[in-house]
């Protein structure tokens, strides 16, 4: 086999894993799963037998590898499927916790990964969110605006995305303000400005909170909860050296409370 083919196979394996298709001897094109079952396992069995390894042990362990290949399911693929499923049902922090708990339980049972069922939210009985850090809990899929954007645009964007808080960023990605639904309501009610009649030149800078209270990602969510409660605010932008990287809102805490209450139900 040429060095170029070996290097190409290595890069494919690193990039695509179990979905790779290799160039084998005599320029044969073969998938990973077929290569394992048709070429490598027979060679491995023959070599292990020649070294006097117990036949039962050979069959047991080679069958695990064979079944992984046939089902196209290894540990990495199982984790991706599990996380993708759970992320649609709950938050990232709880999805990771449920998945990790399922991995731990299955490993303790000694079950091969290709036999693992995908985890369910109900499988996690002892969820303690108080130990979470802000960076594990915050929302990172953010919509932001700049201070020069028109208020009308921001109002429509917040209504479209059904969000109550909109961070304001400068050109370097640093947070410089915060728009809330309450500010928008106050603006339109006090000024009497409608979309059709209003002064469309007024911008975010005219009404934003210019120095919002923020929190660092390494803090605990208990600390975040205390800040929001004491300051009577509904959200905390998460920043690192002034750069906005996430946000925590009261809805995140409501979600956790709901999950904990549901678990108390018989």
Image (spheres, grey):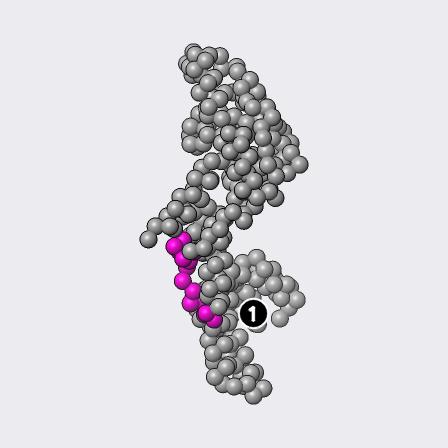
The answer to whether residue 21 is above or below residue 36 is: above
Residue extending furthest left? Answer: 266
Assess whether residue 114 is covered by the magenta stretch: yes
Assess whether residue 68 is covered by the magenta stretch: no
Q: Position of residue 259 (x, y in %)?
A: 41, 47
State the extent of the magenta-drawn residues as a range: 109-124
Q: Position of residue 23 (x, y in %)?
A: 56, 66
In this rendering, does residue 249 appear at all?
Answer: yes
Q: Position of residue 168 (x, y in %)?
A: 56, 28
Tell me the element at label 1. loop
Quadrant holding the N terminus: bottom right
Taking depth in this image into account, of 255 and 222 the one nearest to the observer is 222
Q: Residue at x 53, y 19 (%)?
A: 207
- Total label count? 1
User: Residue 125 vs residue 36: left or right?
Assistant: left
Snapshot quadrant of residue 135: top right
Taking depth in this image into account, of 233 and 206 the one nearest to the observer is 233
Q: Residue at x 42, y 56 (%)?
A: 125
Snapshot quadrant of residue 167: top right
Q: Residue at x 46, y 69 (%)?
A: 109
Q: Which residue is mark 1?
A: 24
Taking depth in this image into account, of 123 and 36 the one nearest to the observer is 123
Q: Position of residue 150 (x, y in %)?
A: 51, 20
Q: Residue at x 53, y 32 (%)?
A: 230
The answer to whether residue 65 is above or below residue 146 is: below
In this rendering, does residue 83 appear at all?
Answer: no
Q: Residues within 10 Å of mark 1 (few under 14, many from 20)?
A: some
The answer to whether residue 198 is above or below residue 110 is: above
């Amino acid at each position: 086999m040429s060095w170029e083919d070996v290097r190409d196979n290595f890069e494919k394996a690193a990039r695509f894993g179990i979905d790779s298709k290799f160039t084998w001897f005599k320029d044969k094109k073969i998938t990973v799963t077929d290569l394992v079952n048709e070429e490598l396992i027979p060679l491995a069995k023959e070599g292990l037998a020649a070294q006097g390894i117990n036949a039962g042990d050979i069959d047991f362990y080679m069958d695990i590898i064979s079944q992984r290949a046939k089902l196209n399911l290894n540990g990495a693929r199982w984790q991706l499927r599990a996380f993708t499923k759970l992320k649609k049902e709950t938050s990232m922090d709880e999805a990771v916790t449920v998945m990790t708990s399922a991995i731990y339980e299955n490993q303790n049972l000694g079950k091969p990964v290709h036999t693992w069922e995908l985890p369910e939210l109900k499988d996690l009985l002892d969820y303690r969110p108080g130990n979470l850090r802000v960076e594990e809990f915050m929302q990172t899929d953010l919509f932001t605006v700049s201070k020069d954007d028109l208020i009308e645009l921001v109002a429509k964007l917040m209504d479209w995305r059904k969000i109550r808080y909109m961070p304001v960023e400068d050109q370097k990605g640093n947070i410089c303000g915060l728009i809330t639904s309450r500010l928008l309501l106050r603006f339109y009610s006090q000024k009497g400005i409608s979309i059709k009649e209003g002064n469309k030149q007024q911008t975010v800078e005219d009404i934003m909170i210019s120095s919002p209270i923020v929190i660092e990602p390494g803090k605990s969510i208990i600390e975040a909860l205390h800040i929001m409660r004491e300051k009577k605010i509904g959200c905390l932008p998460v920043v690192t050296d002034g750069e906005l990287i996430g946000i925590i809102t009261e809805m995140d805490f409501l979600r956790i409370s709901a999950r904990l209450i549901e678990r108390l139900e018989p």
